[in-house]
Amino acid sequence: MTQPPRPGPPLWLLAELTYRCPLHCVFCFNPVDFARQDSELGTEDWLRVLREGRELGAVQCGLSGGEPLLRDDLEIIVAEARRLGYYTNLLTSGVGLDADRAAALKAAGLDHVQLSFQDSTREMNDFLSHTKTFTLKNRVAKIIKDQGWPMVMNVVIHRMNIDHIDRIIEMAHEMGAEYLELANTQYYSWAFLNRDHLLPTHEQLRHAEQVTDAWRARLGERMRIFFVAPDYHEGRAKKCVNGWGSMFLTVAPDGTALPCHTARMLPGLAFPNVTAHSLREIWFDSEGFNRYRGTGWMKEPCASCDMREQDLGGCRCQAYLLAHDAAAADPVCAKSPEHHRVVEAVQRAAAHGPAGPVEHPLVFRDPANSRRLASPVTPDR
Ligand code: SF4
Ligand code: SF4
């Protein structure tokens, strides 16, 4: 294998401050075995991580989780990030953001808030998160606007809410969101467990895209709408995290440093911890960050494919989950020998239709299910 290319600096530092979360989303991107990873870095460690990230060249700092508002030291972390010159972004479910906390975070220098909703209807929002949070999220949206923060509303899209997309967009517009991210579910972690429930049909997707385009034409720049296309339906791989170890550096709650937040599931690849190594060592020299940089690690069909520089062979976690080999072509690609697994999953979705049925129940993301389930997620059979 050729030497991986020397990367530039990470632009994004994503600090996953905690896996604790009051919600139980069925598509949660946190590891399925999060309950077994309950240690969290202390405040001083996070402040050091922020300093080292900035010294490396990172300019954006995402504060995420779980629910980052569950950390009592969030204001201290935000203030240090601001002092260091990061642009800070809080990714939150809204639980815990009352007017006083919002004022404190504003005073600490928080730049931006991304608020997640599960749906435009109370019933589906509360069902999917297994909590009664719809009314609260509406209040939080107003608090965000009152503080003058630009608001990104994020809605994970799947079979159970995709037919509400018209009302979801209208709701975001009514609440004054500057940006709406309609993020089609990525099938890792909890979403992979629940894939048969969540994967929409081609018809649902086509309709959702038409509705989104009509709203874009109507609203123009007043609210920018991002529709993150689902790779299962496209037959094409995506450049995952803009290239492994090229832009994003994620630090998990226990200090494990990752090129993307799901990479920890990959077997046989050790990821370093910030308590034992500097971010500089981790970024430039660790096996975890170097293994899939560039194209030198590729096998056929990627190794000789003329798309390899554009998509870098797609997502390593998806290759592991679907092809049982993290170095394989991402099976969403039509050239992958395992592409039939994706085709079959989409065909099952079409056979079930918009409402299901499916033979097994939804699995909610909660500590009891996390302890019960295999670690990591079992790949497709
Ligand atoms: S996806 Fe849902 S359960 Fe997972 S961290 Fe976000 S709000 Fe919590
Ligand atoms: S074979 Fe590999 S490099 Fe070529 S398009 Fe498919 S995933 Fe991309």
Image: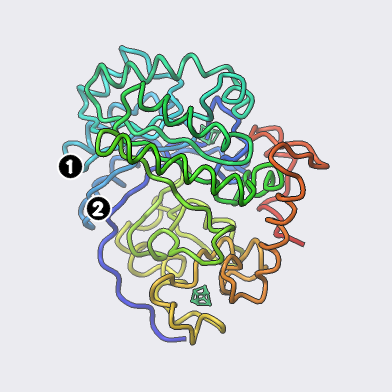
Image point 23% across, 23% down: which residue?
A: 106
Q: Which mark is residue 58?
A: 2
- Quadrant of the rendered image containing residue 73: top left
- Left or right? Give the position of 18 relative to 202: left
What is the x, y in percent for residue 297?
48, 79
What is the x, y in percent for residue 345?
70, 56
Q: For numbered disc 2, what is the local secondary structure?
A: loop
Amino acid at dot 2: Ala
Colour scheme of the picture:
rainbow
Label count reads 2
What is the x, y in percent for residue 236?
52, 67
Q: For numbered disc 1, what is the local secondary structure?
A: helix
The answer as to whether callout 2 falls within 8 Å of ligand 1 is no
Q: Quadrant of the image for the C terminus?
A: bottom right
Q: Is residue 88 above or below residue 148?
A: below
- Left or right? Give the position of 269 relative to 221: right
Q: Is residue 148 above or below residue 341?
A: above
What is the x, y in percent for residue 207?
54, 44
- Left or right? Give the position of 336 relative to 90: right
Q: Which mark is residue 54?
A: none
The answer as to whether callout 1 falls within 8 Å of ligand 1 is no
Label 1 crowd bin: few (<14), some (14–19), many (20+), radius 10 Å? some
Tag 1 residue? 84
Label 2 crowd bin: few (<14), some (14–19), many (20+), radius 10 Å? many
Image point 71% across, 49% down: which residue?
A: 349
Q: CA distance from mark 1 to mark 2?
A: 10 Å
For discs 1 and 2, the disc positioned in front in the rendered view: 2
> Which residue is most to the right?
359
Amino acid at dot 1: Leu
Given residues 329 and 273, the one toward you in this image is 329
